[in-house]
Every structure is written in C-alpha cells, then in structure tokens.
Image (cartoon, rainbow, N blue to C red):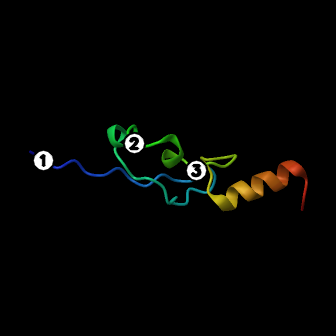
Amino acid sequence: MAKKKKPDYPHCGSCGKKMVRARLRPSELRKLPKSSRRPERPYPELCPRCMREKIKSEVGVV
C-alpha cells in the first residue's frame, strides 16, 4: 500500500509566508481539539506580522 504524503504547510493569506501550524491530513486534523487546529487570535489566516499590520491600519496607528 502506498504511503500518503503529508499536506504542505499552510500559508499566510496576505504575504504567502509559510506558517508554523499543524500539518496534518484532514482526517487527523478533525481528531484534534479546535484550539490545536488553528491559532486563537483575531485573524487566524494571517501570519502574526500581517495580523499586527492589519490591526494597526484598522485602528489608525501609524
């Protein structure tokens, strides 16, 4: 039986940088608690740097 390869790392939605997150197949990901599947911050699809920039732009801080 062929071994299934792991999926690629998730990428930031803004800059495309590789994010450090669970790199699991969907069936394995479902078994994890929700807090382990994605980061608990306002914009989980962005890397921390892009998230900070987005929040600063929304608030109006330069």
Question: In the image shown, does 22 or 55 lie closer to the viewer?
Answer: 22
Image quadrant assignment for residue 52: bottom right
Tell me if mark 2 has few (under 14), some (14-19) or many (20+) residues whose alpha carbon lies within 10 angstroms of its own: some
Q: Nearer the N terminus, badge 1 or badge 2?
A: 1
Q: Give the SS element for disc 1.
A: loop
Residue reaching furthest to the front: 33
Q: Which amino acid type is shown beneath numbered disc 3?
A: Pro
Relative placement, left or right, of 57 versus 40 is right
Look at the image and tell me in which quarter the C terminus lies: bottom right
Residue 17 in picture, x, y percent from top left? 55, 60
Residue named by callout 1: 2
Residue reaching furthest to the left: 1
Residue 39 is tagged as 3
Q: Are marks 3 and 1 in contact (CB under 8 Å)?
A: no
Between the C-alphas of marks 3 and 2, the distance is 14 Å
Q: Which amino acid type is shown beneath numbered disc 1?
A: Ala
Residue 47 in picture, x, y percent from top left? 61, 57
Q: Residue at x 48, y 45 (%)?
A: 37
Residue 28 in picture, x, y percent from top left? 34, 42
Tell me if mark 1 has few (under 14), some (14-19) or many (20+) residues whose alpha carbon lies within 10 angstroms of its own: few
Residue named by callout 2: 29
Relative placement, left or right, of 10 versus 44 is left
